[in-house]
């Protein structure tokens, strides 16, 4: 069983729509959750981190965490073609466990 | 301030040769990670350091791969007797500690002919 799971996509949304990216994780004691964006040929860069249940908003991005259901999601409002990238979910279980990345969801925003 | 740097940015080598990849983390970051990313694939964890110790080296694919870190600074990833399947981008990331946000370097693109 994979520790962090994401749908590989591609997820295609029209420009201006809301893109919803989902991630599930297996370790119930996970404490820290991260969303990274990776453009083709580039390194991953952090979009948001979230540590407690609920929503966290930053501009057009909202991260949602539900520890009881063991999922974390990322909403992108007013999607733009420049948002087209692979989005990586990362989870840390605390203690001396490393951060674990999912395989990523490829998002395509169609003009 | 300066971000994570990696060298070389590109490396072409012949099968069977040894290569050494270098990572300079952000100053003050105690945790350092190495990943491999094959073309079109996800991140493959190799090893991470907390300080100069490696609590988790479970991702190293074989005994041809090794890594070391000097204190809380530079790390080197060594691949001995390279094989064509080692061709990939090798990414290094550092974080303030192992639970915090990771900041990635630009990667080293390795091509084994």
Image (cartoon, coloured by chain):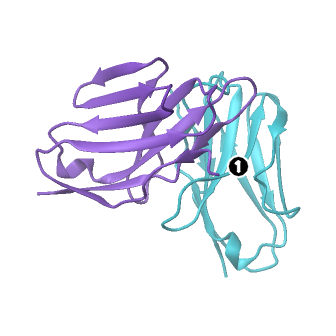
Chain colours: A purple, B cyan
Q: Nearer the viewer, residue A67 or A81?
A: A67
Q: Nearer the viewer, residue A84 or B17?
A: A84
Q: Position of residue B52 (x, y in %)?
A: 83, 32
Q: Name above or below for residue B17 compared with residue A48.
A: below
Q: Position of residue A40 (x, y in %)?
A: 39, 59
Is residue A100 found left or right of A54 in the rendered image? right
Which residue is pictured at 34% across the width and 53% down the height? A85
Q: Name above or below for residue A91 compared with residue A106.
A: above
Q: Name above or below for residue B46 compared with residue A54.
A: below
Crowd around label 1: few <14 · some 14–19 · many ≥20 (10 Å): many
Quarter of the image where one finds residue B21: bottom right
Which residue is pictured at 67% across the width and 24% down the height? A94
Asked if residue B13 can be seen in this view, the reply is no
Is residue A72 found left or right of A13 in the rendered image? right
Q: Provide the secondary structure element on which disc 1 rests.
A: strand
Q: Position of residue A105 (x, y in %)?
A: 40, 53
Which residue is pictured at 57% across the width and 38% down the height? B4
Q: Position of residue A69 (x, y in %)?
A: 48, 31
Is residue B79 found left or right of A74 in the rendered image? right
- For disc 1, the marked residue is B22
């Amino acid at each position: 069983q994979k520790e962090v799971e994401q749908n590989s996509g591609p997820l295609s949304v029209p420009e201006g729509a809301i893109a919803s990216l989902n991630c599930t994780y297996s370790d119930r004691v996970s404490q820290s959750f991260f969303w990274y964006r990776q453009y083709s040929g580039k390194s991953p860069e952090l979009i948001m981190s979230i540590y407690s249940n609920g929503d966290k908003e930053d501009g057009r991005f909202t991260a949602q965490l539900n520890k009881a259901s063991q999922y974390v999601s990322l909403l992108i409002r007013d999607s733009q073609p420049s948002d087209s990238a692979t989005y990586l979910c990362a989870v840390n279980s605390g203690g001396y466990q490393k951060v674990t990345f999912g395989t990523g969801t490829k998002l395509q925003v169609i003009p | 301030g300066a971000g994570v740097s990696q060298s070389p940015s590109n490396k072409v080598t012949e099968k069977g040769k040894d290569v050494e990849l270098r990572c300079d983390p952000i100053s003050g970051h105690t945790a350092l990670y190495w990943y491999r990313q094959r073309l079109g694939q996800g991140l493959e964890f190799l090893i991470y350091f907390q300080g100069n110790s490696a609590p988790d080296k479970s991702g190293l694919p074989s005994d041809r791969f090794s890594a070391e870190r000097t204190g809380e600074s530079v790390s080197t990833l060594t691949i001995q007797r390279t094989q064509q399947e080692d061709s990939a981008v090798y990414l290094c990331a550092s974080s303030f500690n192992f639970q915090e946000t990771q900041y990635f370097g630009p990667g080293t693109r390795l091509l084994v002919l």
